[in-house]
Structures are given as structure tokens and as C-alpha cells.
Image (tube, grey):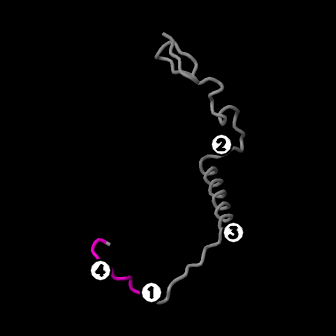
Amino acid sequence: MIHSRPGFAPRHSDRVPAKLNDDMIPAINRKPLTPDSNLKGGGPEAAQHQLDARTEAAMAKLAREHPPTELLVNPTPSDPPKILTPGK
């Protein structure tokens, strides 16, 4: 019996896993990775360091674009109004 699913090559038995068609392979896996890629090589420490550097740069840019707002504090707060009607 031929098993067929969209995006997968047809298979003739249950023992062999189905292979993806060439057009269904994710774009990141279609071409070989470069040696300086953070996905391969350099170890997880190098990739984490690059991620931390990007995060710090993004946070600094965000702080420049959106400065903190000033909080207005009432120096003499009043008591909340008394509600004498039940259910309100």
C-alpha cells in the first residue's frame, strides 16, 4: 500500500519514515551553514554571547527612543468617597 501525505514523498512501508519533499524543507536548512553562523560551531556559549549583545543593544535603543515617564504623586491624598447605598 502506498502512503501519501501532502509535502512528504510517498512511502511503501511503515518501517521507513517519510521524507520531506524538497519544496517543504525549511529555508534555513536548504543551504549549508557558514562557519561564522551562530547556529553551528562556536558552541552554545558563543551563540549566547551574541544573543546577549543583541539584547543589550536593543534595550539601549529602546531606552533612547522611549525615556521613562514622570510619575505625578498627589502629596495630600483624600479619603475615598463613602457609599451609603447598598449594592453600589
Label 4 sits on residue:
84
Q: CA distance from mark 4 to mark 3?
A: 49 Å
Asked if the stretch drawn in magenta spans residue 79, the answer is yes
Q: Which is closer to the viewer, label 1 or label 4?
A: 4
Q: CA distance from mark 3 to mark 2?
A: 34 Å
Label 2 sits on residue:
41
Label 3 close to label 2 by CB (< 8 Å): no
**Foreground: 68 or 54?**
68
Q: Position of residue 17 (x, y in %)?
A: 51, 21
Q: Residue at x 42, y 87 (%)?
A: 78
Label 1 sits on residue:
77
Q: Specify the amino acid type for callout 2.
A: Gly
In terms of sequence position, does the residue under pointer 1 or pointer 4 come before the other? 1
Q: Is residue 65 positioned above or below 31 on the image?
A: below
Q: Residue at x 56, y 23 (%)?
A: 6
Q: Which is closer to the viewer, label 4 or label 2?
A: 4
Q: CA distance from mark 4 to mark 2?
A: 71 Å
> Is 56 displayed left or right of 83 in the figure?
right
In terms of sequence position, does the residue under pointer 3 or pointer 2 come before the other? 2
Label 4 close to label 3 by CB (< 8 Å): no
In terms of sequence position, does the residue under pointer 2 or pointer 1 come before the other? 2
Q: Residue at x 66, y 56 (%)?
A: 54
Asked if the stretch drawn in magenta spans residue 43, the answer is no
> Is 64 displayed left or right of 81 in the figure?
right
Q: CA distance from mark 1 to mark 4?
A: 21 Å
Label 3 sits on residue:
64
**Foreground: 61 or 54?**
61
Q: Identify the magenta region.
A: 77-87
Q: Is residue 82 positioned above or below 28 on the image?
A: below
Work out which quarter of the rendered image holds the C terminus and state it: bottom left
Q: CA distance from mark 2 to mark 1?
A: 60 Å
